Each structure stands twice: as structure tokens, then as C-alpha cells.
Image (tube, helix red, strand yellow):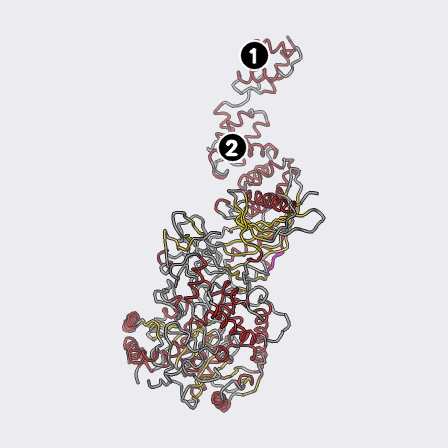
Amino acid sequence: MELYSKTATDLAGMLRQKQCSAVEIANSVFDRMDAVEDRVKAYLTVEKESALAQAARVDEKLAAGEELPPLAGIPVAVKDNICTKGVRTTCASKILENFVPPYNATVVERLKEQDFVMTGKVNLDEFAMGGSCENSAFQKTANPHDLARVPGGSSGGSAAAVAAGEAILSLGSDTGGSIRQPSSFCGLVGLKPTYGAVSRYGLVAFASSLDQIGPLGRSVEDVAMLYRAICGRDPMDATSAALPQAAASWDLEGGVRGLRIGLPWEYFGEGVEEPVKAAVYRAVEELKKAGAEVKEISLGSADYAVSAYYIISSAEASSNLARFDGVKYGYRAPNCEGLTELYERTRSEGFGAEVKRRIMLGTFVLSSGYYDAYYKRAKRLRQRIMGEYEDAFADCDVVITPTAPSTAYKLGERVGDILKMYAGDICTVTVNIAGLPALSVPCGKDENNLPIGMQLIGPKFSEGRLFQTAHTWEKLCGGFNAIPTL
Amino acid sequence: MDYEMIVGLEVHAELKTKTKIYCGCKNEFGAEVNTNCCPICTGMPGTLPTLNEKVVEYAIKMGHATNCSINRICKQDRKNYFYPDLPKAYQISQFDIPLCEHGYLDCIVNENGDTKRIGITRIHIEEDAGKLIHDDSFAGSLVDFNRCGVPLIEIVSEPDIRSVVEAKAYLDTIKSILQYIDVSDCKMQEGSIRCDVNVSVHKPGEPFGTRVEMKNVNSFSGACRAIEYEANRQIEILEQGGEITQETRRWDDMKGCNFLLRSKEDAQDYRYFPEPDLLTIVVEQETVDRLKAELPELPNKKIKRYMEEYGLPHFDSNLLVENIATDRFFEQCIALGVCPPKAIANWLLGDVTRILHEKNIEITETSLTPEKLTDMIALITKGTISNTAGKTVLEEIIFSDKLPEDVVQEKGLAQVSDTSVLEEIAKSVLAANAKAVEDYKGGKTNVIGFLVGQCMRQSKGQGNPAVLKEIILKLIAAE
Amino acid sequence: MKIDIMHLAKLARLRIDESEAAKFEQEMQDIIEMVEQIPELADDYQDVDPNHPMELRADDIRPSFRREELFANAPQMQAGCVVVPKTVE
């Protein structure tokens, strides 16, 4: 078994037992990149040189007998909307094509303190807007399980890189499902943390009230390890929270005996493909056999959640993306006559179609005369959705749903079909709207041998409980970690 | 029938916190361009604001000083518009829940100390924008982001102002309060306090007219000129049978007139919405109470007290209160209880202020102490030295550690009250001015002043003029 | 409902030509139709949440960035400033 196909947990153990070196791990990952990247196209920027240098430093420290943090020497890919000092951060947009931040995102700082090895920056839908990675201005990433299919999105590069063995772990961001849906499509474990659990400082904002950075990996333990490294209050992010003690500790081996699982029937409706539903039901059955209680619940506002999501996220995006105006950084349209021309041409030439569409929608719902009818209404629905989850968690500990209504679809299949694209978000958006943590874990495959994902949702700061439940399932199903042949 | 103007003012004051409102960069005027900047205040992608606690405190202080109610629970909002000096393309401000609202100010509007109550609609916190530098030698404009994120409070008045005099009184009161409670420097030339003006006119008894807003009013005196101009412009239009249109105009203080900036149809749509990067501001009641307890006596109240308690004229009270350092000195002098407030005020506003102006310094930069000044004044009241000698003493004690008594001794400034010495002087003066003596006897009693003056000159200013006068009268009567 | 695409484009500083405008309008109509299915809810919504107060920052100075480093991404600089086309207020 090649080093690149191992989990971070295994590699961390091997490093400490001197069964391999950090440089060997890094080389294994970069060799794998050489072999498959031209087909997967997960990376926008590869940081081989600095990664190998960092791995060498880790080896030196290990040789000197230093005790290192768990992620030391582990190759991690970073979504290209997370700022990395001195390393190009493009958001997969022409408007930031050559942008090199003079600062690190807080999560990157925290991983640096852990001596992690950054393999590079990975692809996404432009500014994280999309669910297939096809909205990248630079390249289309393929799903390692079927190169003709999308890896999901927006963290498609983060998912594809880990699934293909081009990284051991990755960081993604999730505004409406952008970590969980690609994790589902690529057969990975992916966590969207509680809103406020992870600092957003340095994450190029899409929708500030919904965005969270989170980990993707090939095992529950790996994802938990990366989450532990990045979570916690950051004075640079006013919306970040001090984690309750219970939220930062968990027992993966705790089992599910007595765990109350809620199945909201609205999430198993006709919009969800049969094989997906069947796979999730099978997994829930296994958990029930292992001692969990299962009950059907109702989350009534699910049907309208996508609408509320598009209003709130687009409104915030229209404001967040206004700063890309050609003045201070990024693309500037050449030979402009006046200020208005500079703004309009820079933004029209610099942004892709989906981004412009959302800016227009967001501008509309905030504009004079429409604010109450749209934005305010969406905020009220948001409050309703939060209340429904609160009620649900009075009766159960974990809510289980499919992560996505379908498995990975073919590249190009849904391009231009806006409503179909948006409908893909129905299972995931309520979690962002309510600020809850949710974990996607593999739960079998469909008839095309494509991975299916199951979503575990918990109350705020219940990440530990989600890890514990997911790990139980991981053991019941014999483990997730399998890199497809490419 | 005459027109009446209806004026509302929006004052923007920069707060003198150490750091900016949403990042730790220095809040400082006059630094080299673009050096007090970081990724946050230049709006770089991924950066987030964190609110400076002092901004909240300073704004609440001003709220208390203007009798506002404090919204302990409030929020911030984004005001979206594109301009090169606004790097995020939105200004973080407050929209529907300002930190302070529903206040008022009693402004002194005349010499009698009569006040006019002007309502304060709201006070909210927000960030300043950067500066655009225009240079004719160059085809573009330059952006300096140093001022981006400098904390501002916007103080919005009710349309309660009815004249330029009231506007001036209101603005002066706002400025002196900001300085008294120590939250803003109010340096006009540095643009640390600016205002927007709303003007309409109507005939009393009729509904208010259409309102016109004026921007770019960069000084308080400019504001008064702008109001005067705009009211006259509107009256002229109405008199010619025209109509006022709701619009925003730009004041040009150099030219003394204003120009149309945008009409109502082009009104900006700022698309306000709650700032998602910041949580709810919750100020503890104890903090609100503490800030109220910490407020000093406010200048407009103080002016009234000086007039009523000390019998000072409005003009003098105002002058004293205007300069915080001098006023503090004045109060310290009073507290010593050595001499009457009026005499202290006269000296402080007269010779002391003159010397300070000449040297361009504050009273705190001198060696003068309340003890020294009151001792000196007491020497005059006791008759030990003359008023003229007092001036000499002041010149000495203001820049040295010398005590007034020492100077009097050293320079021999004590008044001569010894009648035998003074009689000799008076005799010689009368002998030399026989004509004046004749005039006096002929009924021109005012020559006595001249004669006393001559005696003073002979005594080199040390004669006690009151004693001298007595002696002269006695000598003439005896002739 | 008629959506004024050109007005919105102006507000958002985007340039949209006629052919694009029609497409945008259709797409936005679709989205808005979807949005209009949201039920009317009682207006008990509060934009403030006193249960989650914000921690404020102490007024302590942090070093600013070096100008050359901070503006390394700027498209055009002169005399330490970012250059933009001439603005007239």
C-alpha cells in the first residue's frame, strides 16, 4: 500500500515509529500527482518545493526527538478561497488570477503551528458558487471515481485531491453544502462545522452568515483530527465562538447505544434518487441494530429552504464581492476612460456568469422596495428553520438525511439548468441556514459504482457526537478508505 | 410675510481612539500616505472587522452628554456604494438601531444666556473613508487609505434650527462638548469634524418646504455660510413662483455658492442590511451608568453657571469655557477662595491669554499656577501693588518659579503709600502745573486725573493712586 | 413582475448587453418564482440577538503593514498611492 493511500492517522503513527519519513510521504503524494493530476485537475497551484522543504524540517525535528503535533508532516490541500501568505489565492476567478495575499487565514496559521505540509491550492466553483466545480474560471476538475463526472462543489478540488490520493486531507468551505456534497460525490468524510466553530478570517467571503471552513478526509478519525486543529475562538473573527468544553472532546469508540436518530421524511422525498434513499435507510438500519433508536421526524420548512438560502447568500455575496473593483488588487480592465468604466468593465470581464447572476440576484433582493418582500422574508424563514431544528433536537440527538439527492452527475450535464443545479442543494442548505454542524459519510454505492453520502446533523457544537456516530458506522461497514483505480 | 428657514444638521466627528474602529492600525492624522494600513482597513479579501470597545464607549459618552437614550442592544449595518476611497465598497455604519437616540441640546443663543432646545435624532458609529488626492499635473487621482476605518460618530439633529445664529450655537455647543468629554479633537483643519446640512424654507404657519441636502461642508463657519446661501436661493426661487426640488447639492466654500450634485431621481440606493461579520452589540447597564457618572460638567451648563453664580458676562463665560485648559485653571483659582471670580476671569482672559497667544502655547505649558495668579491678584486688591505693576509681576511669574511677592520685592514694585513721600511729589507736580490747578478751581474737576497721572509718573508707578488723589485734593483745598 | 435588469446592473457595476439581459431576466424570474413560494410568516423577526453578544476589541495598537507588501497586488501605484481614473465629486 502506497503512502499516499494511507490515512493521516496511520501516517502520523508511522512517522513516530520511524516507519517512514515526512519527505517520503510528501514524495509519495507528489508522485501520485504526477501520475493522475492531468486527468483529475484538482490543483490550481502546486507547492511542491515548499512542501518538501517543510517535510524535511519535520523530519529534522523528529530526528531531534521533538514531540510534534498530530498533523506534523501530513500533506494537506487547501481550497483556493482560503488565503495563504505568499501563495496565489484565486477563488478560481479571473478577477483574482494573480492575487497573492500578504497574510494567512487563521486556519492556515493554526495548521502551520502544527507543522503541516501544504501540497497546494485546489480548485472550486468561482468564489465557491456552484455545486460541480464547473464554474471555475480555470479548469474543470474530474471525479476520481469516474473521470467523466463532476467531483461536486464547490469544494470539488478539495474532494477530488483527497479521493485521488493527491493529498491526505484537505480544507474546504461550506456555504450551502460545498464540503458535504463533494465529499458525498467522491466517497469521503467531510465536516461542515457549527457556525462560529472555525475562524473565517482569511476565507474569501461568499456569504458571511453561512460560510464555514471544514475538513475533508478518508476516515472519520482523520477529519476529526483536522477539525481539532482548526477549531476554536479567533479574536480576528467576531463571529467565532469559544467552544464549549464538550465540543472539543469526543470518544470515537463510544458507540451508538441509546442514540436517538431522527429521520425527517421531507428529506427522503421524490427529489431524492431511489438508490440514495435505499443506501441511507440501510445504514440507519445498521445503526439501529447497533443500539440506536430511530424515529421519523418532520422539518417542515425544508421545501422553502433553498429559496431562503439563495436570497440570503446572494444578498451577502453581492455586498462581499463589491470590493473586487479593479482598484486595489486583482484584475483591472485595461485602458478605461473613467471610474464607471473601470468598475463595470473590470467586474464584467473578471467575474464568470454564475457569480454575476448571484450578484444581480443579491442586488435585487436588497434594493429599495424589495428588501422586505425578499430579504426580510428569507430571514424570517431562517428563524423558523432554526426553531424547527431546535424542536427536532428535543426528541433526537442526530438527524440523518441523504447528503445529496443524487450521486455524481456527468460533466456538462446540468450546465445552464439553474433550477436543477439549485435543487441539488435541498439536503444541505438548512444546516447552513441554522448554523448547525453536519458530517457527510460514505454509505455505499449506486449501480454505476458511484459513492453515496449520508448526512449526520447535530445541534450546535455537537461535532463530537457526529464523529462518534459516524465512526460507529465506519466500523460497521468495514471502513471507507478506498482510493479508486485511475 | 417673511420666510423662516428649517435646518437640520448631520455632524460627523472623528473619535480620538488609539486605533481604528475595526482593526488595530493607528488612528493618527498626518502620517505618510498608506502607512497606517493593514489588510483589514484596505478591504482585502477574507479579512474581517472587529469592533473597538472604546468607540462604543465614546459614542455612549456623547449620547449621555446630549441627553440621549442609549440602545444597549444594537447592531451594525452595511451601506453599499462604490467609490475608490471605500475599499470594501460598503461602509459599516448603523441603520435602524443607532447606539444613541432621542436626545436634545440646550444651546445658548444670545448674550443673555437664553437657550434654545434642539433635538438630537440619533448618534451612530461608523467608519470613515480614505482620501482622494487630485493633482492637475496628472491624469488620474491617487488614493490614500490611511483614514479608512477611522472611527466616526454621526450626530443627527432634528430639523429644529431656525436661523444661522441657532445653527452656529448648536455647532459650537456640539464641538465644545466633544472636546469637554474628551472624545474628539474637533480639528477643523484636519477634517476631524465635518457636517452635512439640510435646509428648507417656509412661511410660518404653513407646512415645511421641500428639503435640500448639502454635502462638502467642511467647516462650521462654512456651514453657516452654506445655510444662509441655500435659504436665500430657495426664497428667491419661491418668490419668482418656482418650486424647490428635493436634491443634493455640493457646497463650494471658496466660491460661496452651491451646485447640483444629484437630483432625487438619481438618489443612491445604499441597500442597507445587517453586517453579518459582526454580532449584536450588547453594552452592560453598569457600563452605561459608569460612563454617565464619568461625564464632566458640560460647557453649555457651565457657561450658564458662570453667568448666574459669578456674574460674568456671556462673552467672558463663553471664552473661558471654550479653552478647556484655561477653564480648568479658572476653576482651580476659584477653589482657592482667595479672590473674586470676576478679577480672575479678567486676568485670565486679558493678559494671560494675550501672552499665551503671543507664544502660541497652552496655559499648562507655563509655570503659572492658580496659587501664583491668585496671590498676585490679591496683592493688587490689597493695594500692595498697582494694576500696572501686576502686569509686570505676571510677565515674571508666568515663565519662572518665582513667587509674586519675590518679584514685587526684587523689582521694588510695592506701591508707596507713605504720605510724607507722596506729599513731596504732589507738591512738586502742583507747582509745575499751575495752569491745571487753576482749571480745577475753575470747575474743570476732571483735570484731577491728569494730575494724579503726573504724580504716578514721578513716583515711577509706585505711588498709590488713591492716596495720591486724596493728597492732591487736600493740597489744592489748602491753597 | 418586471425586473429592471439594467438598473440592477448599474447598481452592481456590471455591464450587461441586451442579449444577456433577456437571459438574466428569465433566470431571475425563475428564481423569484421559487422565492415567492416562501409562506408569509409572522413578523417576529429580530435582527439583534442579545443572547450572543459580541466580544469587543481592546483599543491596543497593532503594527500596520509595510506599504510595499500591502499594495504588492495593486494594479497601479504612484507616490505611495493607488492610482484610479480621475474622480470629480
- Residue A328 sits inside the magenta stretch: no
**Residue C50 in view of the camera:** no
Determine the image quadrant of residue B378: top right
Could you tell which of marks 2 and 1 lies nearer the N-terminus? 2
> Which residue corresponds to the image point at 71% horizontal and 49% vertical from the top-left?
B206
Task: Pick whichever, A226 or B382, lies toward us.
Answer: A226
Query: Does residue A31 appear left or right of residue B42 in this picture?
Result: left
- Nearer mark to the viewer, of 2 and 1: 2
Q: Front-most of B267 and A403?
A: B267
Of residues B248 and A29, the one drawn nearer to the viewer in this rendering: B248
Mark number, residue B354: 2
Callout 2 touching callout 1 (CB < 8 Å): no
Q: Amino acid at mark 2?
A: Arg
Q: Quadrant of residue B440?
A: top right
Question: Looking at the image, which residue is at 36% across and 65% down?
Answer: A98
Secondary structure beneath label 2: helix
Q: Which residues are magenta?
A: B67-72
From the viewer's perspective, is residue A325 above or below residue B402? below
| Label 1 element class | helix
Q: Chain of mark 1?
A: B
| Residue A359 in picture, x, y percent from top left | 49, 68
B244 vs A452, left or right, is right
- Residue B203, image x, y percentages: 69, 46
Q: Quadrant of the N terminus of chain C?
A: bottom right
Crowding around mark 1 (Cα neighbors within 10 Å: few <14, some 14 to 19, many 20+) is: some
Q: Which mark is residue B429?
A: 1
Q: Position of residue B366 (x, y in %)?
A: 48, 36
Q: Amino acid at mark 1?
A: Val
In which chain is the residue bearing label 2?
A: B
Residue B282 falls in image quadrant: bottom right
